[in-house]
Amino acid sequence: MPAKRSLKQTTLLGFVTSKKPRLSRSEQTHVSSSSDDPKKQVTEGRDEITSGTQKGGEESEDPKKTNVTSRSSLSPSATAQPQAAPSASASSSASSSAPTSTSTSTATSSVLAPPPPSSPTNSPNPQPSLSPTKPPSPTKAFTRIVPHTGSLFPTAPPNTLLIHACNTLGSWGGGIAAQFARLYPSAYKVYKSHCVRHKHNRGELVGRALLIPPLDSPSLPGLKEDGKGDGTGPGVRGHYIGCLFTSLAYGKKRDSEDKILAATAKAWRWLMRLVCEAEEGGEMIREVRMCKINAGLFGVPWESTKRAIEGVELREGEVPNVGRVEGEEGCRVEVQVWEIGC
Ligand SMILES: Nc1ncnc2c1ncn2[C@@H]1O[C@H](COP(=O)(O)OP(=O)(O)OC[C@H]2O[C@H](OP(=O)(O)O)[C@H](O)[C@@H]2O)[C@@H](O)[C@H]1O
């Protein structure tokens, strides 16, 4: 059964950024560092589902290698999941820039612990009654983009994961990010505080991702798809939000196209890992949607971004249940890309 969230439930899907040596899983749940003190995150990041794994700058970019996953209260069995961390960086097809070093790891934890039920903007989404049973995760898969026409938001059922590209400066001020900020104010706070927490090491965020659980309740009055005013009714929200850090900054200071594409591939792997961890912790993500990330303010041709994402070979622990299709030619993870039609 899907885990029902309570105040005491926590999911630590660690965003690791300290320079501490890698610890065992049991040790990792107690990791504390100046920048990513788990206790601090229980306070600061209690609405965060986040995050994979992290490491410091030159450390491995493989989420698995630094992963901190503590779901003791959410799903005790989850902590017993085998890590089976393959030498991830070695087999990445699309992330040639993936570091191979594993010298250090950090522990950033993200906490999936809902705020009081009385807070409407923070009410967690009811988990759908989907079967948690699944076939064993395949050891590799590729993402396949499935095009759809329409706005990303209005038809997305509750518990859909909506993905967009972000910079590390903590503002969802332009493009579709501004729509996210209006539609998902609680998620925006989580994103912003995450960026603030990393303000001294923003560079480490690039190529990583943040997974925010449904914090903005579907029972709230709806907004139009552009985020302005009422209109679309309940169900618009109640979504997971995936932030791909594909550029350090925005505007003229945005990264080069090549850097954005490399960061996109890395961040994609990272996010898929986070999704897997969330699923292991009992989260039931219903479908995955994204816009044509990088194709607006970042100015990267969509076809290049699509190639980068579809070129990432997802490995064990990175192949989520949601969107997974087993075909004759192997396993694929289908992700919907929504584009507003003319
Ligand atoms: N409702 C909707 N449904 C479906 N597709 C929609 C849509 N609305 C717009 N699009 C399309 O969505 C694509 C992405 O276009 P965008 O310009 O938004 O994003 P991007 O990925 O190039 O760049 C990211 C930086 O923009 C922000 O900056 P701030 O944080 O504000 O500083 C971020 O945070 C990053 O930094 C384009 O194809 C748009 O046509």
Image (tube, rainbow, N blue to C red):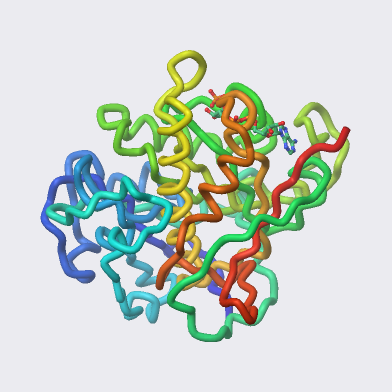
Q: Which of 93 and 53 lies nearest the eye of the viewer?
A: 93
Say how many tags the image has.
0
Give the image location of residue 24, x and y in percent.
17, 69
**Residue 200 seen:** yes
Quadrant containing the N terminus in the rendered view? bottom right
Residue occupying the point 37% across, 37% down: 206
Whether 250 is drawn above or below 294: the answer is above
Give the image location of residue 96, x and y in percent.
34, 49
Give the image location of residue 196, x and y in percent.
36, 30
Residue occupying the point 33% across, 75% down: 79
- Tell whether 69 sits left or right of 241: left
Whether 125 is drawn above or below 341: the answer is below
- Tell whether 281 sits left or right of 328: left
Ligand 1's image quarter is: top right
Quadrant containing the C terminus in the rendered view? top right
**Residue 68 seen:** no
Find residue 330 and report its image quarter.
bottom right
Q: Which of 222 and 6 lies nearest the eye of the viewer?
A: 222
Whether 206 is drawn above or below 31: the answer is above
Give the image location of residue 210, x and y in percent.
45, 47
Residue occupying the point 68% across, 31% down: 179
Q: Which of 277 and 266 lies nearest the eye of the viewer?
A: 266
- Tell whether 7 sits left or right of 85: right
